Image (cartoon, helix red, strand yellow):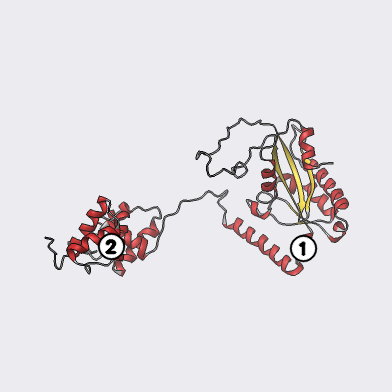
């Protein structure tokens, strides 16, 4: 005959839940089994589920915070002290907090951090450069200038912008993971399709590209074995002017706004004098600001995706791919 237990202690109920949960029973099964011994009102099903989650999260203490001689674990003063400790070391661990608060259980500290203070742990992500306050001020000024000009001139401002940048073009470009996807029948073998890793050629060419909101204006390949200088960049700008004259009727007379980075050939005295003679406006491009010249995440991204899986053997094969005259 089954004998029911009347008025059980809370710690007793939680100990049984912990034992059955460790044994592999789920919350519903635990509540059903314990109801036979302690009565259906011993604890609600939702509370049983909550304690199962607490034990899954690493809690081992079955007593209320402050039980067994411990100080209350959820007082406002304690929460503030824990918050100060967390702010002082964002890479804290519960074990480290337990050393700072030896009289507070680890489960109580975890509850304070995750539920009362609502902290969550995130991994750091890589960024290209730690910007100084001066760099941040320059970026803010450049961004505000663009916004003000667009607010004043609207699409006319966007129509005049010509963006220039350089990138390496490889003769062999590996296809992206997205491009390698294949449709598989539901009855096909479950294993994924495979592709073999190849050793790609190191042959590549540096290309200078200029484009506006309507499309690419000019692609200029750097001669092999040479580097970009102020003189060579000035010649490229002259070719760009002729390309704009041929492809965008009336654009030169309405004004050009050139957006390129602050590489030395771009800011050299000879380049600056040439741009002044052209009457072109040069937009400010603060250091370490790739997002203010959108080639890397717009034009070049689409181009490299289109190149994925293609192989070129010679310059004569590479150049027509970009429709260069």
The quadrant holding residue 100 is: bottom left
Q: Is residue 251 above or below residue 308?
A: below
**Earlier along the polypeptide chain: callout 1 or callout 2?**
2
Residue depicted at 83% across the width and 43% down the height? 235
Residue 184 location, x and y as percent? 57, 43
Q: Secondary structure at mark 1?
A: helix
Residue depicted at 67% across the width and 60% down the height? 142
Q: Nearer the viewer, residue 268 or 30?
A: 30
Q: Nearer the viewer, residue 293 or 279?
A: 293
Side of 122 relative to 149 (left or right): left
Q: Nearer the viewer, residue 276 or 259?
A: 259
Q: Nearer the viewer, residue 268 or 223?
A: 223
Q: The C terminus lies in which quarter of the figure?
A: top right
Residue 135 location, x and y as percent? 61, 55
Counting other residues with Cα less than 10 Å from the Cα at mark 1, is it few (<14), some (14-19), or many (20 or more)? some
- Per the rendering, the mark at residue 170 is none
Q: Which residue is mark 2?
A: 48
Q: Is residue 54 above or below residue 129?
A: below
Q: Which residue is mark 1?
A: 157
The quadrant holding residue 219 is: top right
Distance (Cα) linking label 1 and label 2 = 63 Å
Say if residue 11 shows up in the picture. no
Side of 294 relative to 275 (left or right): left
Q: Secondary structure at mark 2?
A: helix
The quadrant holding residue 320 is: top right
Counting other residues with Cα less than 10 Å from the Cα at mark 2, is it few (<14), some (14-19), or many (20 or more)? many
Residue 73 location, x and y as percent? 27, 64
């Amino acid at each position: 005959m089954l004998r029911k237990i009347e008025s059980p202690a809370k710690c007793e109920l939680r100990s049984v839940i912990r034992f059955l949960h460790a044994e592999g029973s789920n919350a519903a099964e635990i509540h059903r089994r314990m109801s036979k011994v302690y009565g259906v009102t011993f604890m609600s099903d939702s509370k049983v589920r909550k304690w199962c989650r607490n034990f899954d999260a690493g809690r081992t203490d079955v007593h209320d915070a402050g039980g067994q001689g411990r100080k209350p674990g959820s007082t406002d003063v304690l929460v503030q002290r824990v918050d100060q400790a967390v702010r002082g070391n964002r890479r804290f661990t519960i074990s480290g907090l337990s050393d700072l608060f030896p009289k507070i259980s680890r489960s109580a500290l975890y509850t304070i951090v995750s539920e009362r203070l609502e902290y969550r742990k995130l991994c750091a992500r890589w960024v290209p450069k730690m910007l100084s306050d001066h760099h941040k001020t320059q970026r803010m000024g450049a961004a505000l200038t663009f916004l003000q000009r667009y607010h004043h001139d609207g699409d006319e401002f966007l129509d005049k912008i010509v963006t220039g940048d350089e990138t390496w073009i490889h003769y062999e470009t590996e296809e992206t993971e997205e491009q390698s996807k294949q449709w598989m029948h539901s009855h096909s073998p479950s294993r994924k399709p495979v592709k073999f890793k190849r050793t790609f050629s190191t042959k590549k060419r540096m290309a200078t590209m200029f484009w506006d909101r309507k499309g690419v204006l000019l692609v200029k390949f750097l001669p092999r074995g040479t580097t970009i200088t102020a003189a060579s960049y000035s010649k490229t700008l002259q070719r760009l002017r002729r390309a704009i004259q041929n492809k965008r009727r009336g654009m030169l007379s309405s004004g050009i706004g050139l957006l390129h980075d602050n590489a030395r050939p771009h800011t050299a005295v000879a380049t600056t004098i040439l741009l002044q003679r052209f009457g072109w406006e040069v937009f400010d491009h603060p250091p370490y600001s790739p997002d203010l010249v959108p080639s890397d995440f717009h034009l070049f991204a689409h181009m490299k995706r289109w190149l994925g899986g293609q192989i070129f053997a010679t310059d004569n094969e590479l150049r027509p791919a970009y429709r260069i005259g």
